[in-house]
Image (spheres, coloured by chain):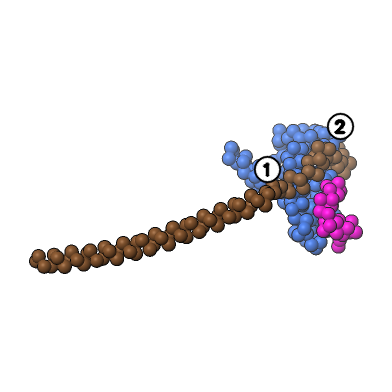
Amino acid sequence: MERKEQWINQIMDTEVYINQAKPSQALQARLKRIPNTLSVSYIRLPKKVVWSVAASIAVLICMNFIAVNEYSSNTSSSSNSTELMDSHFSYLTQIEL
Amino acid sequence: MLEITDISLLELVKHDKDRAFSLLVDSYTGKVFNTCVNLLRNNEDAEDVTQEVFTSIYLGIDGFKGKSKLSTWIYSIALNKSKEFLRSKTRKKRLGRLTTIEREDTHFLPNQIINFNHPGVLLEDKERAKIFFEALDQLSENQKIAFTMHKIEGVSYAEVAEIMHTSISSVESLLFRAKKRLRELLSDYFEKNER
């Protein structure tokens, strides 16, 4: 009984035999690199490139705007002519009847 | 509540975050690594989780208001990351085979001894450390954490209570039950093997 208690106490005395583990140098180095791995790196473009891209986008928007305007004016005039034709032919069919 | 070193470190964070982080790494790597290695029982896993802990520290240090001690905040992150890691590992294991979730009533069998070499244990003490850690693994999660933090890490009752978001009396009760259960398990092991 006494031997058992003694053995249990030896196992339970963790302070005696479990020491603080020393982290490896490699781990320390890995941890110190964290700020570098997390910081986002930006590539600075020359101002000329930025302005030319912005200008081409503006031109593209203008061209699209003009194209949409022209398309809508064309469709409205063509719909007017078809309306005229329809009324003319319906008039002719009425006369035939 | 804050220690002078905590205050100066937090001041440094505002002016030179990377330098403050480097000082934090020097001061807390040992503590974080030991917490992780005692909870995860695997050196490589402990190193990976330690890295995750310090990444969280780097990302969150600006938002740390100093309501608790810096060490308490760091221990909490280490504990949560270790728990997350263990849960994801258990989930992966469950996909392969069924494992018992509640281990309170299981018997401590000698063939359950795992092959883990604790880096802080001398060669002549490896055997008793193996027996101890296997017995510790039979405890409930909270009992295991409280025992590891207080008895192995040497963290005070009050700090363990704060880390575990509980009261000091709950920690005392957890430790009392943990010690009682460990003695039962070790007694059982002695009867079967050491007699």
Q: Residue at x 47, y 60 (%)?
A: A65
- Rendering coords of residue B39 (x, y %): 75, 44
Q: SS of the residue at dot 2?
A: helix
Task: Locate the N terminus of chain B by quadrant.
Answer: bottom right
Residue to which mark 2 is pinned: B124
The amino acid at mark 2 is Glu
Q: Range of the magenta residues?
A: B1-28
- Nearest to viewer (mark 1 / mark 2): 2
Of B87 and B99, nearer the camera is B87
Q: Which chain is blue?
A: B
- Rendering coords of residue B165 (x, y %): 75, 59
The chain to which mark 1 is attached is B
Q: Main secondary structure of the magenta part?
A: helix
- Rendering coords of residue B91 (x, y %): 62, 44
Is residue B21 within the magenta segment?
A: yes
Of A93 and B77, nearer the camera is A93
Task: Give the number of the disc on residue B128.
Answer: none
The amino acid at mark 1 is Thr
Task: Give the number of the disc on residue B106.
Answer: 1
Q: Which chain is brown?
A: A
Residue A26 vs A68, above or below: the answer is above
